[in-house]
Amino acid sequence: MPQSLSWYPEELAWHTNLSRKILRKSPQLEKFHQFLVSETECGNISRQEAVSMIPPLLLNVSPHHKILDMCAAPGSKTAQLIEMLHADMNVPFPSGFVIANDVDNKRCYLLVHQAKRLNSPCIMVVNHDASSIPNLQIDVDGRKEILFYDRILCDVPCSGDGTMRKNIDVPSNRQTQIRPTMFPVKDEEKLKAMNLERCLRILPHHQNTGGFFVAVLIKKSPMPWNKRQPKVHQKLPQRTGDAEVTAANSGNGSDCIIEEPTLAENEESKKMQELQNLDTEQSKKEGVCGPPPSKKMKLFGFKEDPFVFLPEDDPLFIPIQKFYALDPSFPKMNLLTRTQEGKKRQLYMVSKELRNVLLNNSEKMKVINTGIKVWSRNSDGEQFGCAFRLAQEGIYTLYPFIHARIINVCIEDVKILLTQENPFLSKFSSETQKKVKDMAMGSIVLKYDPDPEKPHDLQCPIVLCGWQGKTSLRAFVPKNERLHYLRMMGVEVFKAKRKEEDLEDKTEGEVQHRLVQTEERMDVEDKEHDLVPKMEAEIGEESSQSPVKSSAMEIENKIEDLDQSSKNANSHVSQEAKDTDASNVKD
């Protein structure tokens, strides 16, 4: 039975003593295993060692913090940091962000997969050697400044001393070499100088956990080797004298003033330099390292699609803004694509702070992925008023800015949308049918608001992306996310049952599609009346050989002829079905 970890806040962490093998093979735990797999895929839970959750927790992250995860792959701790940034769900764009780095390019893509589950616009994945990661610059009131992080998580590669607990098949069941990790160093004098009694050392055999050593280092003042930065101000009316020097126009057309230090400041800087020299000499005597040696960053061999922000007057955004009636406060400058030429297939969004980082460090950083997908191009979508449909990944980010194309649905309508692939409008409530008929075809937002007078129903809001057709309504929601919402509503779906229901839904959907085509044919009945006498005459001639079989075959052949003759009349219906299927495949 899973139990909550008492030391983790708000009962957000749970643990079980069941092994992975038992979870996979035991029939009694099949339902629990399916729950873990589907909820992990859609980002609602993450599975990791309990001790691995301690370092992010000790960082005490707030939504405004700028965080660097230096050795981030595979991304479990990164996911924790993102969750802490989005502690307030009512704020779609927290002012903080996470830059997740890893030196291994292949593991970076595993990190991307883990981070994208949380659908955050405040995450950037980069591929650098952490020992030579570049100093990033940001624009602050028209001047360039170095980006300083509020929190840095460094989960460095370890010796793997705790592997014996999880993997009893370690060669010879022995560890022939133990490096200083969770075990104390032998030199007692160094041990006392490091104040390790203030750190956290976790041993595997104490409480059946992994081994870990955690130290929280707080920077109290600038490092002695950091150069003093000059004071930079906005350009003021020039005065006579030598106290001010006007800088030349920079590339972006902005001017700045650099104040020369005063006499007192010169004396202060000399004292600082002397102290730095003394600290360096003293450090060398004590064997403590000084400033880290500089390393050259290698950018060759790096190939990734570019991140191109949409210009403010891009004509691509005008129909989108009009179709969805976006709020004037919508940050359209934060939209970006991954292509410079040709049609833009996807539109992504990042936070304002990450946009600042991307624009000012494009040549320094090896960015693997960033942003959240908010719009996706629909094939032949221009005929519906907008070429881009909403993406479920970014709907909770976009929803506060959308003022049109919203349909409020009841709990029963949500169940129909999540359990059926392409249901007819006639299956929905009368209120939903009326709202749909008053709205043009295309991408829509389906919103469920809980009813306080019905406490037995789901008591949290749901926002879904959908598509309104001529006679049907569907939701563009991934499979695992559908299962998540169904569980919240008390509708449990097993894997075996789901296969049978999917087959039934597919068969029913084909029948429904056939009926839709039949209903749309305006002139088929007239043609059938004209062909009935001919069919009866032909069937009567061959009835002597095989009356029943011949009649059935002739009727099928004539229906096929009718289908062919009415193909042009209902081409728009079949085209709509193709577009819908194509969009579903893409999702």
Image: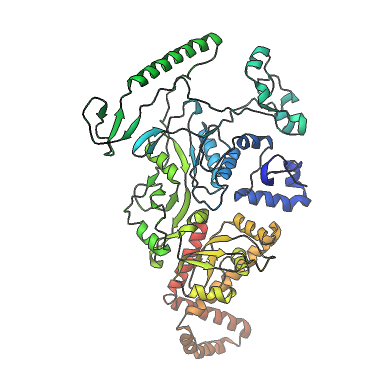
Q: Is residue 263 shown left or right of residue 581?
A: left
In this view of the protein, which residue sits in the foreground, 500 or 251?
251
Residue 380 visible in rendering: no
Q: Position of residue 279 (x, y in %)?
A: 49, 14
- Tell me how the rendering is colored: rainbow
Q: Position of residue 117 (x, y in %)?
A: 56, 47
Is the residue 334 above or below the residue 104 in the image?
Answer: below
Q: Is residue 328 shown left or right of residue 120?
A: left
Q: Where on the picture, by quarter, is residue 225?
A: top left
> Which residue appears at 76% of the width and 41% of the height?
17
Q: Is residue 167 shown left or right of residue 40?
A: right
In this view of the protein, which residue sits in the foreground, 451 or 485?
451
In this view of the protein, which residue sits in the foreground, 383 or 562?
383
> Which residue appears at 69% of the width and 46% of the height?
11
Q: Position of residue 76 (x, y in %)?
A: 60, 39
| Residue furthest out toward the left | 240
Label total for image? 0
In this view of the protein, which residue sits in the foreground, 126 or 332?
332
| Residue furthest out toward the top | 285
> Which residue appears at 34% of the width and 31% of the height?
232
Q: Is residue 442 shown left or right of residue 54?
A: left
Q: Where on the picture, by quarter, is residue 315?
A: bottom left
Q: Position of residue 470 (x, y in %)?
A: 48, 73
Is the residue 284 above or below the residue 568 in the image?
Answer: above
> Which residue appears at 24% of the width and 32% of the height?
248
Residue 534 visible in rendering: yes
